[in-house]
Image (cartoon, rainbow, N blue to C red):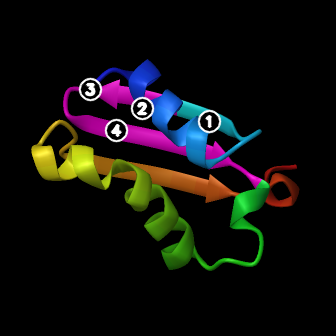
């Protein structure tokens, strides 16, 4: 799956987020900086991201995801 397609999917869920996607084969590295993560622990943040990508993980288009999820305040 192309990085642009993944970024497009994520930007629909995480509006006004700073999203970086690096695809290496079927492995995806993400950094998402969004206020949508405010008040959420690491597990809840990851669940939000997996909720967007789950269909593509299930199909095998994405095999592994490594993610860094930050609020805007944490990133500054």
Q: Position of residue 18 (x, y in %)?
A: 71, 36
Q: Are marks 3 and 2 in contact (CB under 8 Å)?
A: yes
Q: Determine whether 14 is above or below 69 in the image.
A: above
Identify the residue under disc 4: 28
Q: Which badge, 3 or 2, comes first in the chain's sequence? A: 3
Return the x and y of residue 70 as percentages of the image width and height: 69, 57
Label 3 or label 4, whichever comes before in sequence order? 3
Q: Mark 1 falls on what kind of element?
A: strand
* Cβ atoms under marks 3 and 4 closer than 8 Å: yes
* For the residues bearing labels 4 and 2, Cβ distance under 8 angstroms: yes
Q: Is residue 51 left or right of residue 74?
A: left
Label 2–label 1 contact, CB within 8 A: no
In this figure, which residue is indicated by the disc labeled 2?
Answer: 6
Residue at 47% of width from left, 36% of height from top? Answer: 9
For the residues labelled 2 and 1, the Cα–Cα distance comes to 10 Å
Whichever of labels 4 and 2 marks the residue nearer the N terminus, that label is 2
Magenta residues: mostly which secondary structure? strand
The answer to whether residue 47 is left or right of residue 39 is: left
């Amino acid at each position: 799956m192309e990085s642009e397609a993944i970024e497009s999917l994520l930007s629909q869920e995480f509006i006004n987020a700073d999203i970086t996607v690096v695809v290496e084969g079927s492995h995806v590295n993400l950094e998402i900086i969004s206020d949508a993560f405010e008040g959420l622990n690491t597990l809840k943040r990851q669940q939000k991201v997996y909720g967007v990508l789950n269909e593509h993980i299930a199909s095998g288009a994405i095999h592994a995801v490594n993610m860094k999820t930050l609020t805007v305040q944490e990133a500054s």
